[in-house]
Image (cartoon, rainbow, N blue to C red):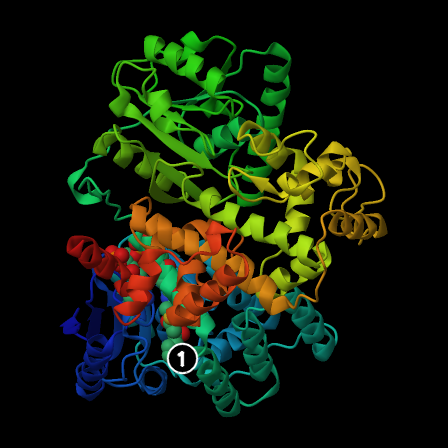
Amino acid sequence: MAQYSRISGSVGLITLKSLPVNALGAVVRQGIVDSLKTALQDPKVTSVVICGQNGVFCGGADIKEFGDSESGPPLIPMIHAIEAGNKPMVAAIEGFALGGGLELALGCHYRIAHSKARLGLPEVTLGLLPAAGGSQRLPRLIGVPAALDLIITGRHVTAAEALQLGIVDQVTDHHTVDAAVKFALSVAGRPLDARRISSYSCPPVSGDLDALFEEVMRKVRRGARGAIAPVACVQAVRAAATLPYARGMERERELMATLFTSGQARALQYSFFAQRAVSRWSTPSGARWDASAPKPVRKVAVIGLGTMGRGIAVALAQAGFPVVSVETQEKQLTEAKRAVSQMLERGAKRRGVAAPLDKMSYSSNIQAVADVDLVIEAVFEDMGLKKKIFQQLSAVCKPDALLCTNTSSLDVDQLASQTRNPELVVGMHFFAPAHVMKLLEVVYGPRSSPQALATAMQLGKKMGKVSVAVGNCPGFVGNRMLKAYVEQAFFLLEEGATPELVDSALEEFGFSMGFFKVSDLSGLDVGWKVRKEDGLALPGVSTGPSARIRQGRRYSPLGDLLCQRGRFGQKTGSGWYQYGKPGGRVATPDPWLHSFLEEYRAQHGLVPRRIDPQEVLERCLYALINEGFRILEDGIAAGPEDIDCIYVFGYGWPHYRGGPMFYAAMVGLPKVLERLEHYYRAHPDVPDLQPCSLLRRLVASGSPPVQKWKEAIKKLHSQL
Ligand code: 3H9
């Protein structure tokens, strides 16, 4: 709702009231329309202030209402009515004014912001554009280049930047509504024509307008990789710059209509809620986020200052934690100190803050961690080494210190068993570079206490990560699913594809790099090492039927064969592609590799066939999705949102496709099932293609929408 009152004798005060972010749902809009009418009709009222309750101006249109049939007064005429009002309207912005919230403020004649407020038009992140006049008013107010920057990126600006850009008229450190009321009294009776932004022309740009838009559009299309909202944002701003306001608004409406009904907007809005849903974690044993209080964490230690340890230490210091970093090898320690300081300084420069160098301390002695509340061990992926460190930590640390391991696949429970308090051990799987990548898999073992899990989840949140709680199993969620995808990529090469064909199908889908380019970038030897440890990569078995069978199922030794030839990817100058020189970065197709594949196929009696991009997508993605269903069935992930966040924030899944499980729901579960059955019939020696029973049961129960899977899975489990 919106509450109306008259204060200071002549100021009408409209307060938006809709917890938690005063979103502009139907009831709030009705409240604003009614309050406005009262204020405009009351002769005692000479000016109006619009504010929000609870220190928040407005988080924009109510995303939860998207997709419902529209009720209540529409937003655009409401904002027009505010702008057309014959009494000064002042927006009092506290907390944030985002999306429709900022558009409402732009409809006002003046804007006063608290110094801690944040403003922005983040619609693009939801697959939309600012379509309540924002794309038309903002360029008229602050100029085309600045408006393009805000609208295309969706970034939030501080009150200080908003003042500098001309979005707000005044910034206050005091009580915002009081300041706005005082301001409103001071402008009462002043003419308003020059304050109505819709009547402005866009400030002229320096240089050629067409050239500016062409350049921006080129950059945006390149960066968007198939996302349509950023492109529509540019088109809308162009309309503001070239058309009269009313026609610009028509263009804004047309573009929004296309976006609104697109699958991309649905995916991005699903993802918005998925990110929030994963913080409300639960485990199969009944532990829950709302019943488990995290322990306070005041000081943290990082063990091991290789690439991962450095990134983790930087992320912790940037989040404000004092960090003790331990590295036993002196040379590595000296190098790491320099590298960490540089990373902190670069990050601080980018963010315009002071580098938190004073948060860091270093030692070569593990005794230095004696007083910390939480340790993140980030040494080499070697179970023997990690076990030894956990024994030492258990002896050195405070008895109630939480002991976390940064591992991408090792058994967290085995490490827990090395300690006095196995309930205080959890996994924290960071993604490289750890100070940049948003994802954190928090791995609970069978003995991890709910409090330990809650503490690690909260720490991740404070570090700015999307933290997802996952159960303990080989590869956890992300890497376990990836295995199925990688395997299909190899098999497709055996059957006739080239790395270029596979990669271009995946890149066309929206991945920034296809599997083979990623593999060259991260180094083929990484996977080779794991396969050797798993007993899959065997030297000397390169011919005969057993060469392509391991542990009773189809196996492709192609990656191993390249590694045996020293082709580790970019670092050696060749892998699935060639790079000209070791360390080269530009992938070019490699004729040697093509002949090698031909020989390999001939040697193994494989008759190559034409493979189309659709098969590449179906084989790679549906195998991965199928494993996702198995993970849900096993209770390793609590719901599809968890898997989708992991893939969007850790594995480069295109954000505008929501994540693999959302994508499966969009494709239609019956179709995914039918295609998996088809491919499994063709490849009965590939168990990953055998449709998982949960997928079958969801299809049999009518393929509920993805938002209902958690419930459906619970019901199916209880029927077993
Ligand atoms: C728009 O305005 C379109 C117009 O241009 C044109 C229309 C014609 N609606 O993030 P938090 C919920 S599009 C509904 O945890 P924080 C959120 O789901 C909109 N609900 O808090 C969560 O609920 P729950 C453009 C919303 O303090 C709770 O509020 N606006 C909305 O970390 C707390 O959220 C945006 O894109 C909403 N608009 O961050 C802003 N916003 O507790 C989107 C939030 O049940 N919002 N909720 O999980 C945000 O970026 C952040 O939520 C915000 C607060 C910065 C506001």
Q: Is residue 386 left or right of residue 8?
A: right
In the rendered view, does 437 fall on the left or right side of 572? left
Ligand 1 rendered quadrant: bottom left
Counting from the top left corner in percent of width and height, residue 473 is at: 38, 36
- Residue 163 placed where, x, y %? 47, 60
Quadrant of res 454: top left
Report the residue at 68% width, 29% height from top: 539
Whether residue 394 can be seen here: yes
Q: Is residue 115 visible?
A: no
User: On the rendered image, what quadrant is the N terminus found in?
Assistant: bottom left
Badge 1 crowding class, 10 Å Cα cut-off, few under 14, some 14 to 19, many 20 or more, is many
Name the residue located 29 percent from the left edge and 13 percent from the top edge. 398
- Judged left or right of residue 13, residue 243 is right
Residue tagged by mark 1? 132
- Mark count: 1
Question: Which of these two is toward me, 247 or 261?
Answer: 261
* Type of amino acid under label 1: Ala
Q: Is residue 539 left or right of residue 310?
A: right
- Ligand 1 lies under 8 Å from the Cβ of mark 1: yes
Q: Residue at x 60, y 76 (%)?
A: 203
**Placement of 700 over or under 345, stated as above or below:** below
